[in-house]
Image (cartoon, rainbow, N blue to C red):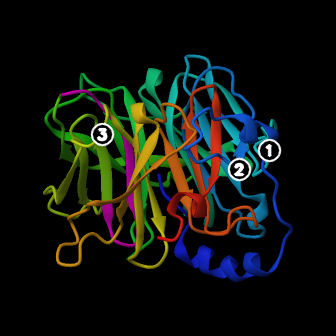
Amino acid sequence: MRSAPLTIMAAFALLWACTGQPGKVTEQATAFSADTGAIRPVVITDTVAHDTDDPAIWINPADPAKSLIIGTDKDSDGGLYVFGLDGKIQEDKTVRNLKRPNNVDVAYGLVLGGKPVDVAVATERETNSIRVYRLPDMKEVAPGGLPVFEGDSLRAPMGVALYTRPSDHAIFAIISRKDGPSDGYLWQYRLSDNGKGQVTARLVRKFGKYSGKKEIESVAVDNELGYVYYSDEQVGVRKYYASPDSTGAELALIPAAAYTEDNEGISIYKSGDKTGYILVSDQSANQFHIYRREGARNDPHRHEAVKIVRVSTQQSDGSEVTALPLDPRFPKGLFVAMSEGKVFHYYSFADLVGEE
């Protein structure tokens, strides 16, 4: 999971500081939470058919107010639902009849047919594959999906994060799975054109430790700083270099000792080239731990929580965030989190960080 490139964010920050009308909190959001101390969402989406799990945000470069939220409906008859900033399902873009789609992520500028296109990539657990769709029309550009973890007895893919290498803009999918070995648990694939304007995936690396305690579902990439983070549930958040050319040594483990049960969804808020926050779901406590993206002053790989925020979201598996103020309701950006009840919650990031 990842936010839009900083170049897009910079281009539109001034625009939305000067235009637009004040937004209104939906009636659902106003009445939702019985916990009066919990932060309330600005918008609650329409319900999906079965079970929401993970969202991604696509920033519309022509008009940020027309940006999209893509969310998984995790079921054997599941789908990828597409929402506007109003939380309404956009039926013409929504993809149905997928076999347990789990997580989804977005990347910008994958070259297909000689032209850069934006893509959404989702894991499809029951087919041991990933599905790739062009944005914003959600046309499939890898028909039938791309197999992953081939040759391994433990395949079922769960998490996915897309890494764009700054040096050449090559795009890679880093994928986790339901179960796997104690080392080499994540597999990394380079996405490229197959010569016919469609996406192909080539395995370039196996890396990452796994405790064996539960599972690894949430994966997030920081393109600018070159890191990948993933939740080894009930153990902590592991940190590695994202480049396939790196050594593969673990850089840090953010321990899960302070979490009620599962450390889950990870999202990265980029307030600058090197600054911002890492947000991790404390799933059973209905709260998020917020860490400094840049780490400690004397150690960039030591991430201590600076704040814990209670939210109205229930049992959140997945989340995503952008610092771009997509419309005036989100002056410091938009935070999206999956919640029980078959919905996603949209929060103003300013409500989460306050004066931080």
Tell me the distance, in whole angstroms, between the alpha carbons under discs 3 and 2. 26 Å
Amino acid type at mark 1: Thr
**Taking 85 as reference, is 57 left or right?**
left
Tell me: residue 339, above or below residue 82.
Answer: above
Magenta span of residues: 213-227
Of callouts 1 and 3, which one flags the residue occurring earlier in the amino acid sequence? 1
State the SS at label 2: loop
Of callouts 3 and 2, which one flags the residue occurring earlier in the amino acid sequence? 2
How far across and how far down the image is residue 188, in percent?
32, 49
Amino acid type at mark 3: Tyr
The quadrant holding residue 261 is top left
How far across and how far down the image is residue 49, in percent?
68, 21
Query: Which residue is depicted at the point 44% across and 26% down?
Result: 125
How far across and how far down the image is residue 283, in percent?
41, 35
Tell me the distance, in whole angstroms, between the alpha carbons under discs 1 and 3. 31 Å
Q: Nearer the viewer, residue 352 or 190?
A: 352
Disc sitting over residue 26 in the figure: 1
Query: Which residue is depicted at the point 40% across and 72% down?
Result: 224
Disc sitting over residue 259 in the figure: 3
Question: How dense is the environment of label 1, judged by Cα within 10 Å: few (below 14), some, or many (20 and up)?
Answer: some
